[in-house]
Image: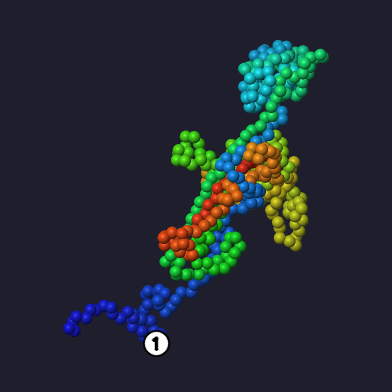
Amino acid sequence: MPGSLQATPGYQLQPSAEQIPLQTNYITNFDFLNQYLPDTYEKEFERYGNRTVSGFLRMVGAEMPSNSDLIKWVEQGRLHTKYVDCESAGAATDPTATWTVNDLLVPTGSVTTGGTGGIAIREGQTVFITDNTTPVTGLSNKAIVTGVNYATNEFTVAYYEAGGQAVAAGVACTVMIYGSEFTKGTNGMAESLEADSEIFETSPIILKDKYAVNGSDMAQIGWVEVTTENGATGYLWYLKSEHETRLRFDDYLETAMLEAVPAEATGGALAAGYKGTEGIFYVINDRGNVWSAGIPSTLDNFDTIIGRLDKQGAIEENVLFVNRQMGFDIDDMLAAQNSYGAGGTSFGLFDNDEQMALNLGFTGFRRGYDFYKSDWKYLNDPTMRGGLTNGVINGMMVPAGSTTVYDQVLGKNAKRPFLHVRYRASETEDRRYKTWITGSAGGAATSDLDAMEVHFLSERAVCTMGANNFFLFEE
C-alpha cells in the first residue's frame, strides 16, 4: 500500500551543486564518519615533563638481599657518660654528700660487678658537678666518688674544694665523669662496665600492583608515540597503561620506604594483620634530629645545626635534599656573604662576569662541615609532598659515606651505607622486583580469564643507621 512506507529514515543532507551554505546542506554532527576528519597528533604531549619522583635512594643508598623476616643491627653507644638530672641530699658547704641520679641514660645492667646494674658511676672515679639553671661562676664542684648504691641509683662524693658543696640541696645538676683517683696500696676498680650499645630492628613489607586489559580491547590497536620517563621512545598501544603502572610502582617502592610507619600495638592495622615498617621520616622523627622552626635560612640557623652535629657523629660530608623554597633560601643566604662585586654578583667560585648568564645558584658550601645541596623532586611534586599544607617537609640532611655496625644475622661487623634497602631473597626466590603475566590473552595461558594481567611485587625494608646523624627540616 502506498501509505505503508514510513517517513524515516529520510534524506539526511541535500548537497548543493555550488559551495554555498544552505539550510539543507549544513552539517551539524562532526564525527569520524564525516568527510571532514579532525587533524590528530599521534605523539603524546608531555605537559608534566618527567612525572616520576623516585631516584633518591639510588643516589644515597644501596640494595642488598636478606633472607629473614626480621632485620636487626647494633649501633654503638657513647664512650663517656654524663647525667643531666641529678640532685643532692646535702646542703651548701657540706664536705660530703649523697647524690641521686634521676635520668638513666645508660641501660640497666651496664655495671657487671658489685651491684644489680644501673648508673655507670663507680667508686674511685672523679666527677665534675655543675648547676643546670644558674650560669654563675663558682656553682660547680670537683669530687671523688666514695660509695655507690646501685639499687637506688645513688652515689656519695667527697668534695675537693674547702668550701664544700657549691649548690643547695635539691638543685638540678649535671654530673660528668672525668677520671679516677686511688690511694697507695689499695685494690683496683671494683666494678666493670659493659659497652653501651643499642639494638634496632625493622621488618620488610610486601608491595604489590597490577595492570589488566581484556582480550577484546587487545584486538583493536591504537598507536601512540611516546617518550617515557626512563628514556625510551617509540610507539605503544594498550601497553602504555601497563608501562605507567610500572613507573608508578617504581615510585611507590621508594615513597613507601620514606613514609612507612610501624603498626602500633593498639592500632587497627596491627589487629588486621598489618605490621608496617620503619620509614626514613619515622626513624628521623623518633631518634634523629628535627628542625621545626621553618627553613634554616641564616648562618646562625646553620651554626645551631652544626652545634648539634658536633654532639652527634660529626660526619664530615652531608647532603641536603631540599624543596624549591629551601633551595632558594640557602642560595640567598650564601649570596649575601659576598656582595662586594659589581652590583653584588661576585659569588664564590662561580666567577660571574658581564659576558655570561648570571648563576644565582649554589651547589654547596663549607662551614665546619661540607654541605652539598640537591633539589628533591618528591618534596616539590604537587601530587606528593609538594601539595601539602600541613606536615610540610622542607628538606632532609643525609650523611655521606658508610658506617660500621654489628650485623646480628652475619654475626660480625659490617660496613653499611647510612641508608640502604634490604629485600627478601634466597637462592630460589628473589623478591627485589618481581613481575609476571597471567590470564589467557596477550600470549599468557595460565587461566580461563579473558584478559591479560601484569603483576608487580616487592618485599623490602629500609635501614636507617646512625639516625642521630640525620636532620629533618619540618615546617
Q: Quadrant of residue 185?
A: top right
Q: Residue 45's spot in the image, x, y percent?
A: 54, 66
Q: Residues within 10 Å of mark 1 (few under 14, many from 20)?
A: few
Please say if 102 is above or below 335: above
Q: Residue at x 61, y 42 (%)?
A: 463
Q: Is residue 185 above or below residue 46?
A: above
Q: Which residue is label 1 attached to?
A: 18
Question: In this rendering, would 408 be left or right of 338?
Answer: left
The answer, for residue 41, to whether it is visible in the render is yes
Is 33 placed left or right of 277 in the picture? left
Q: Is label 1 in a helix, a strand or a loop?
A: loop
Q: Residue at x 62, y 47 (%)?
A: 65
Can residue 327 be seen?
A: no
Residue 128 appears left or right of 261: right
Residue 417 sits in quarter: top right
Query: Which residue in the rendered view is the most extreme toward the front?
Result: 428
